[in-house]
Image: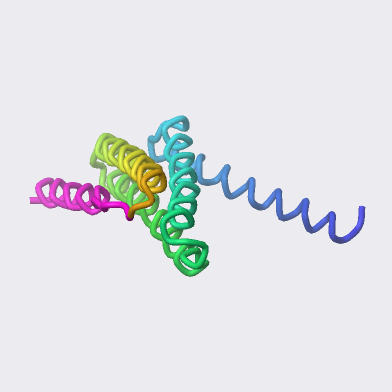
Amino acid sequence: MNDASTIVHIGWIKNVSYIAAFFAFGEYLGFETEVMAIFVTLMILDVFTGVIRAYVVEGGSALRSAIGTRGILAKLLLITAIFSVALAGKGVGIEAQALANGAMGVLILSELYSILGNIHSARNRKPKAEFDAVAWMLSQVRFLLEKTVK
């Protein structure tokens, strides 16, 4: 085996271990593996359809890595928010899995909404109207947490 092939194999193993750790941590927090897989798949489809929408509606010059990186980082923050709610609940002895699973359901629907919006926008070649379901969901989680703490 040459050096380049060894590096590729090590990189592949490292990436698979990140995915395994993500799902193991999610299971520890009480999320179902299937639900997490659906959420991650929809996130990937949202990025894919978003790139197609940007290309069709705004042209190739609209595709910039900085914009894509910001979008992917925003999606990682969503996962962090959901995991944080479940982890904090577990840490203080509050049954937060139901809250976190409900939030995960809202995020799954939000991803679907975004995918359908991207497809609609690309088909009509018009910019997509935005509704920030994630901001709404986060405000609801915050409200429920404030209510629980009081």
Q: Main secondary structure of the magenta part?
A: helix
Which residue is the extreme one toward the right?
1
Left or right, 109 with respect to 45, comes to: left
Residue at 43% across, 51% down: 53
Task: Give the camera-side residue of 131 and 77.
Answer: 131
Left or right, 46 with respect to 135, comes to: right
Residue 68 among magenta residues: no
Residue at 91% across, 57% down: 2
Instruction: From the top left corner, tell me how far across and down residue 17 is, in percent.
Output: 62, 47
Residue 145 among magenta residues: yes
Left or right, 88 with respect to 51, comes to: left
- Compared to residue 119, the image places residue 56 above or below, namely below
Q: Which residues are magenta?
A: 127-150
Task: Give the camera-side residue of 143 and 91.
Answer: 143
Residue 135: quarter of image: bottom left
Residue at 36% across, 42% down: 120
